[in-house]
Image (cartoon, coloured by chain):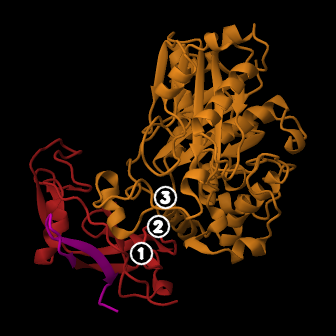
Chain colours: A red, B orange
Amino acid sequence: MPEPSVPFRILPELSDRNRHFWQGGEQGHLTILRCQECGYYLHPPTPTCPHDQSKDVAPEAVSGRATVASFTINHQAWIPGVEVPYLIAIVEIDEQPELRLTTNLVNCEAEDVHVGMPVQVLFEHHEDANGDVWIPLFEPTGGK
Amino acid sequence: MTLTETPLERNCVVSGIGQSDIGRRLGRDPLGLTLDACYAAIKDAGLRVEDIDGLSTYPGAVGGSPGFSGAGAYEILDAMRLKVGFYDSGVETAGQLGSVMKACMAVAAGLSNHVLCFRSVWEGSAQGTGGRKASGALTQYASGSMEWLLPFGSASAANWIAMFAQAHMHKYGTTPEQLAQIALNSRKNAGLNPNAIYAEPMTMDDYMSARMISTPLRLFDCDAPCDGATAFIISRKELAADLDCTPITIEAMGSANHDRATWDQLRDLSRTIGADAAAQMWSRTDLTPKDVDIAELYDGFSILALLWLEAMQLCEMGESGSFIEGGQRIALDGELPLNTHGGQLSAGRLHGYGFFHEACLQLRGEAGARQVAKQPQVAAVAAGGGVTCGTFLLSTRP
């Protein structure tokens, strides 16, 4: 199987609630909202911590290290113009159990991917009139 | 809740069921299909249109992918000139059958006596021959819950549910050959269903050689978009006794969700919230999983039927793969006949309501060539998957 391509991007709609996540890559950081009272990472971001109802929540950079919780090689062109196949994964961020992101795995062969595989973040920069976006993708830890 | 109280749904029966023509692409007005099903269900219940005093539907007149909704609540209220004490629609509920639960609640609350429930789809015609597209309408930017999925091309429920399947295979060793039994069983049963979309025989080779959609899900792991409508009448039990109908008892229902309401944050990706709904259902009845004669379990994707077998406690957690190994156990003449009409995989994506309809037919002994020979008395029904799940236990008990 050829190396999976990167899918056509439908960019996120930026808002005050999510800008830290989609633009954190400009500084090279995966940035997740965190409760400043109890330390819990909130994703998707919400203005109030679900654990202690604190409104003192702020973006913090995490290590960008994660493990693959599940994955799929997508072969269907759901989005017109998309190149298939490509790798979709749910990764669990090292900082907190069950803190997960859907993402794409890149710089790896599809047949090498497995649940539990350690991965690290990298960013794909997209210029856009409504604000540039840095999509967080993941690759095997230590590169290809 | 303890069983010293009678669950409210025990005061309700399914007094009538109805279905429109069903086909891959009928090219008919979806409002017409919906009305056909609604009028058929009313007639089947032995009721007149003016007796209907409630309406509940999934999902209502919403946007989304083409053909997802054939008619909204307002359209049907007006087209049938109904006078109702309760009406409701909504897509954020306990699966497609959440609408039927709300009908039971309306009866129990004294707002209605006979509630018309319907689900109508025309995805076959609306999607045409171009193949299935992303979930929801494609927009320039991704927002709402799709913000966290669409930018990564995780655009379809096929992708989200494929990752449940992968997690289940990793955790429990479930194999593609076991998964295939859901599709093969459905196709075999569909061969006895004159309304099924795909009735021609399918072999393991056919299944395995079909194109991959999103690993480990192949083409025949995905349900068949179609046109058609299904309707039920939920009636107050004491009133049904006077009707010319064959009432089916609603033993219990389950709508619980104790997990994250997102597609990628579930605590355990190999277990859906269906387990919460089913546990609630079992807590509301003196029947147990051993009493179940047939199971009609949502198979929008084959893996969901496996996850439902576990969630409904019809097999041990993690053992659904070995439970259906070889397919004999879930066949029409097996110990637990499953998706006796062909499921959504082969009978068509009637979206949750098809399973409930089939359970009623089987319990009434009216399923024709596919009727389970040993007359079923108790049917387990589940609809939805992932973060939208609802369950029913139906019976022939008075």
The reply, left or right, for residue B334 in relation to residue B206 is: right
Question: Closer to the observer: label 3 or label 1?
Answer: 1
- Amino acid carrying label 2: it is Trp
What is the chain identity of the residue bearing mark 2? A
Residue identified by numbered label 3: B157
Q: Position of residue B327 (x, y in %)?
A: 79, 60
Q: Position of residue B94 (x, y in %)?
A: 49, 37
Q: Are marks 1 and 2 in contact (CB under 8 Å)?
A: yes
Residue identified by numbered label 1: A82
Where disc 3 sits, the SS reads helix
- Place residue B205 in its image quadrant: bottom right
Of B230 and A59, which appears nearest the observer? B230
- Place residue B152 in its image quadrant: bottom left
Question: Closer to the observer: label 3 or label 2?
Answer: 2
Q: Residue at x 52, y 89 (%)?
A: A1
Above-or-below relation of A28 to B99:
below
